Amino acid sequence: MSFSATVLTLYPEMFPGALGQSLAGRALERGDWSLEAVHIRDFATDRHRTVDDTPAGGGAGMVLRADILAKAVDHAAPDGDPRPKLLMSPRGKPLTQARVRALAAGPGAVIVCGRFEGVDQRVIDARGLEEMSIGDYILSGGEPAALVLLDAVVRLLPGVMGNDASGAEESFESGLLEHPHYTRPQDFEGRSIPEILTSGNHGRIADWRRGKPSG
């Protein structure tokens, strides 16, 4: 079964975005994974398609309503759907490569993109949304974060990168920073490729790469 992603958003036109290009885009065309963008406003109940309201207790901004978002989540992930339900949020758990790899090994994900000042806590609790962060900074919405998460996951799906070793031998997989990289030409503005990398001694090359992280 291919990896299936459903994104709940107020801006479905932002998807697939960059995910429709390069390796992820070709994999999407082949059916290696699927992506559906669901418009949260489709679940509003008034003629203005209202999805937000003022925060209880006062304060600036608006909050995404629990009842509207719950309907969207229930549509995207009915009972029995095994996919984790993620909410992109700056207060969530930091996204790690280990979490990315776990997601890539699963059936997919339902991803909620927050907007405004946040999401009513009651729907987070009632629907078991796992808050996920891509960093300690504020975006205008969860859509860019969802694109980052999906890009990290999709590239690890079987066959997407072509060389499966690329996903296992890169930065963070071994807990080390990425080593410097070089390619042709041999000399560039008086700077040469380190001689050890052209020696053909793969043991020494591996030692050099482990001992010289980028910085």
Image (cartoon, grey):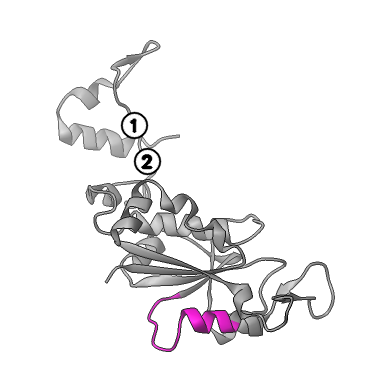
Side (left or right) of 118 relative to 162: right
Coordinates of residue 117 in the picture (x, y in percent)? 72, 67
Residue situated in front as seen by the camera: 172 or 117: 117
| Outermost residue toward the front in this view | 47
**Marking on residue 178:** 2
Q: Quadrant of the N terminus?
A: bottom left
Q: Position of residue 31 (x, y in %)?
A: 30, 62
Residue at the image point whose x is 57% and y is 87% from the top: 126
The reply to whether the magenta stretch includes residue 73 is yes
Q: Is residue 134 visible?
A: no
Mark number, residue 58 = none
Q: Position of residue 169 (x, y in %)?
A: 27, 47
Report whether 137 appears left or right of 86: right
Q: Was residue 7 drawn as part of the magenta stretch in this picture?
A: no
- Decide: is 71 above or below 98: below
CB under 8 Å between discs 2 and 1 = yes
Q: CA distance from mark 2 to mark 1?
A: 9 Å
- Classify mark 2: residues with Cα within 10 Å, few (<14), some (14-19) or many (20+): some
* Quadrant housing residue 84: bottom left
Residue ID at (69%, 76%): 51
Q: Vertical placement of 149 versus 192: above or below?
A: below
Q: Look at the image and give the residue range highlighted in magenta.
A: 70-84
As drawn, the residue found furthest toward the right would be: 58
The amino acid type of the residue labelled 1 equals: His
Say which residue label 1 marks.
Answer: 181
- Crowding around mark 1 (Cα neighbors within 10 Å: few <14, some 14 to 19, many 20+) is few
Disc 2 marks a residue whose amino acid type is: Glu
Residue 28 shows up from this direction: yes
Image quarter where the C terminus lies is top left
Secondary structure under tag 2 reads loop
